[in-house]
Amino acid sequence: MSEAAEAIQPCRLTLAEPPNSPKHGDTYAYLPPKYARTQHELALTIAWICHRKLWGQTYAGLQPDYFWTQPQDAGVLLRPVVTTSRLFPGATKPGDVDLLVIPYHGKELVLERSLAMEIKVIRASHARPGKSPNDFGFSQAEGLSALGFPYVAVVHLIVSDSAPENEWRMMGKAEVLDSSGRVRMLEPEPHDMLPADLMERAFGRLKANSRDGAHGIAAVYLDKWSEESRKFEYNGFWFPECQPALRNPSVSYDLLPYIGSYYLRNSSSFLATPMFDPPNT
């Protein structure tokens, strides 16, 4: 049977008004400073979803069939660390959803496209580029699938130091000329390619260890926390390595309404991220 023929049946929830998206510079979350200094998983998760272009590239890689067909008023609602027992009565395994993603169209939650993510952190370094998590996250992802989430993914967030300049590689460079996308090629210059190498290695290990072909996988590189500016420093970003999440053949239509009711009870803790920039007002 084709993927289209097996599509999940629509399950929607209409809100009183569209989700309110924070503007650039608005505060989303407060965390203890040590979470940033120690590169805590929650701090890195929030840094990732608040870098909306990097988040968008990851989401596009995990849900390409949906991402590129969204209407003008679409977006996603993001909530880190959702305790499963508070989401779905009787749920115990896994203990939580590291990141819950609920798409919306205007005032309507698109519950049948909800995505549950299991997140692991790789704290790598130039001296230890082969470092990997003790647990890849697939056992937890299998638990999320068993609960009946429509789509499930495992994401590894990577942080590291820099490679010494004598190991940088010559890379091509282009200058963007106009809004139509024309570019002019410039002289190649050396660049630190350690982030790309780390993502490639992490993604390869994810593919090799994945036990369910429906699970999406992604390796995402994050820049470092700066004590001076007290924020994660981003000078552009590295495109993540992704494999799409496929429809869960065991989707639970009992679970989907609970996802909607969880949002209604906890809407202020979700980060609303629109697909398109809002029009100027």
Image (cartoon, helix red, strand yellow):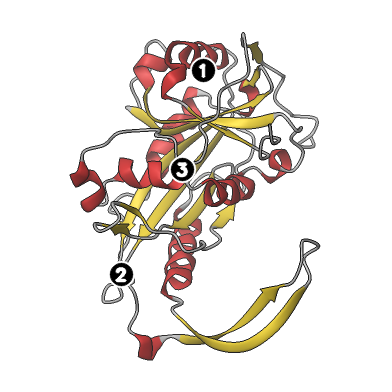
- Measured in 3D between alpha carbons, the distance from the residue under mark 2 to the one under mark 3, in whole angstroms, is 21 Å
Residue tagged 1? 259
- Answer left or right for 10 relative to 109: right
Q: Position of residue 175 (x, y in %)?
A: 67, 76
Q: Quadrant of the C terminus?
A: top right
Q: Residue at position x 27%, y 51% from top?
A: 39
Residue 68 position (above or below residue 255): below
**Between discs 2 and 1, the one toward the N terminus:** 2
- Answer left or right for 70 relative to 32: right
Residue tagged 2? 161
Q: Amino acid at mark 3?
A: Cys
Q: Are marks 1 and 3 in contact (CB under 8 Å)?
A: no
Q: Quadrant of the N terminus?
A: top right
Q: 163 or 153, which is in the foreground?
A: 163
Q: 24 or 185, which is in the foreground?
A: 24
**Between discs 1 and 3, the one toward the N terminus:** 3
Q: Residue at position x 49%, y 17% from top?
A: 263
Q: Position of residue 40 (x, y in %)?
A: 26, 46
Residue tagged 3? 50
For label 2, the crowd category at 10 Å Cα-Cα, with few meaning under 14, some 14 to 19 and many 20 or more, is some
Determine the residue located farthest toward the front in the rendered image: 281
- Answer left or right for 153 relative to 157: right
Q: Amino acid at mark 2?
A: Asp
Residue 38 position (above or below residue 215): below
Picture quadrant where residue 260 is located: top right
For label 3, the crowd category at 10 Å Cα-Cα, with few meaning under 14, some 14 to 19 and many 20 or more, is some
Which type of secondary structure does the marked residue at label 3 adopt? Answer: helix
Q: Are marks 2 and 1 in contact (CB under 8 Å)?
A: no
